[in-house]
Image (cartoon, rainbow, N blue to C red):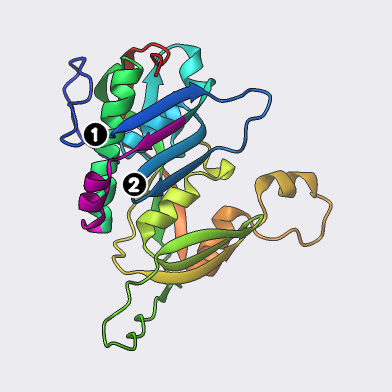
C-alpha cells in the first residue's frame, strides 16, 4: 500500500518491461463459479472467479480487504467475475525464479498491471483521501508474539529458506509461521469485522513470528448472544493473545480512481 500525494492526471499503467507470453481472460461460468483464488507458480499467474476491482488490488499491491482504495467505474467492475490464466515463456520464468521473493512479486504485479490495462482498456488516476482506517498498535503490556526459531541447517551445511506464511486453521483461527506484521495485516484486512477499512502497521515490529489467534467471528457472536461463554471478538483476541490492538483513526490514503474501462477484448 502507498500513502502520500499523487498526480490526478488520468494515466494508464506504464508498460511492464516484461510481459506474459500468452494470457486469457474470460467471464467465470455463472452456473459453476468456484471460490475466488489466486495461484502463482514459477511460470504462470492464475486467478479464478475474481472481479476487475479485486485484480486491480492485486496488481497495484493494495490492501486486499480495503474496499475504499478502488473507486469509480461501472457496477460490473465489482460484480462480474473473471478467470485469468497468464503464462510466461520458459526463459522469462527462469529469469524471474532467480530473483528474491519480494522482487518476484514486484515483477509479476507489473506484468499483471500491463495485462489488465491492455485487455480492459483501463485508464485511471490516483488521488489522496482522508479515510477511516485501523492502526495496528502494540498493547501497553507489549507484544505476545513468539519470535520464529532459526531454520535448522540441512545435511550439506546450507541453511534452508524459512517458511513464512499464515493459514486459516478453522473458523476464527489463524496460525502464523515465520510471519511478519505485514502478512498479518493482509489477512486481518480480509475479515468482516474490519469493515473494508485499510489497516496500517504502527507496531514498529520488524521480526518474524509464530503465533495462533483464535476468536469468535461477529456472525457467531450475534447468533449466540444467549451463550454464556461465546469466546472473544477479533479485537479482544488480538489484545489478549498477541498483545496487539486495532485503533480507529483517519489517515491520508492513496486511492485508485477508474476513469474509463471496457469489458476485456477477445483473446
Position in image of residue 94 (x %, y %): 24, 52
Q: Is mark 1 on a helix, strand or loop?
A: loop
- Determine whether 67 is above or below 75 in the image: below
Q: Which residue is drawn at 63% across and 54% down?
A: 233
Q: Is residue 70 left or right of residue 29?
A: left
Identified at 17% across, 16% down, the residue is 9
Q: Was residue 94 drawn as part of the magenta stretch in this picture?
A: yes
Image quadrant in which the C terminus is located = top left
Camera sees residue 234: yes
* Residue 188 belongs to the span the image colors magenta: no
Q: Quadrant of residue 263?
A: top left
Sequence-wise first label, 2 or 1: 1
Q: Tell me the number on the disc at residue 235.
A: none
Drawn side of residue 202 relative to residue 64, left or right: left
Q: Is 203 left, or right, of 139 in this rendering?
A: left
Write down the residue under mark 1: 19
For the magenta stretch, what is the residue range? 84-100
Res 203 → quadrant: bottom left
Amino acid at each position: 500500500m502507498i500513502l502520500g500525494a499523487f498526480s490526478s492526471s488520468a494515466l494508464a499503467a506504464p508498460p511492464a518491461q516484461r510481459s506474459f507470453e500468452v494470457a486469457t481472460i474470460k467471464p467465470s461460468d455463472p452456473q459453476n463459479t468456484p471460490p475466488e483464488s489466486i495461484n502463482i507458480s514459477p511460470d504462470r499467474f492464475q486467478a479464478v472467479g475474481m472481479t476487475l476491482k479485486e485484480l486491480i488490488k492485486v496488481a497495484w499491491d493494495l490492501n486486499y480487504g480495503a474496499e475504499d482504495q478502488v473507486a469509480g467505474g461501472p457496477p460490473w467492475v465489482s460484480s462480474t467475475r473473471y478467470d485469468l490464466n497468464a503464462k510466461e515463456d520458459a526463459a522469462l520464468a527462469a529469469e524471474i525464479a532467480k530473483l528474491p521473493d519480494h522482487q518476484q512479486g514486484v515483477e509479476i504485479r507489473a506484468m499483471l498491471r500491463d495485462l489488465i490495462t491492455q485487455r480492459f482498456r483501463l485508464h485511471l488516476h490516483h488521488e489522496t483521501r482522508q479515510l477511516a482506517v485501523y492502526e495496528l498498535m502494540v498493547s501497553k503490556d507489549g507484544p505476545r508474539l513468539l519470535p520464529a526459531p532459526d531454520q535448522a541447517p540441512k545435511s550439506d551445511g546450507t541453511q534452508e529458506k524459512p517458511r513464512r506464511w499464515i493459514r486459516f486453521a478453522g473458523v476464527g483461527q489463524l496460525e502464523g509461521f515465520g510471519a511478519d506484521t505485514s502478512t498479518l495485516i493482509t489477512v486481518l484486512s480480509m475479515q468482516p469485522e474490519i469493515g473494508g477499512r485499510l489497516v496500517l502497521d504502527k507496531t514498529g515490529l520488524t521480526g518474524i513470528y509464530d503465533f495462533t489467534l483464535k476468536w469468535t467471528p461477529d456472525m457467531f457472536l450475534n447468533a449466540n448472544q444467549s451463550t454464556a461463554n461465546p469466546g472473544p471478538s477479533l479485537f479482544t483476541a488480538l489484545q489478549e493473545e498477541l498483545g496487539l490492538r486495532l485503533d480507529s483513526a483517519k489517515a491520508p490514503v492513496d486511492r485508485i480512481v477508474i476513469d474509463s474501462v471496457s469489458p476485456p477484448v477477445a483473446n
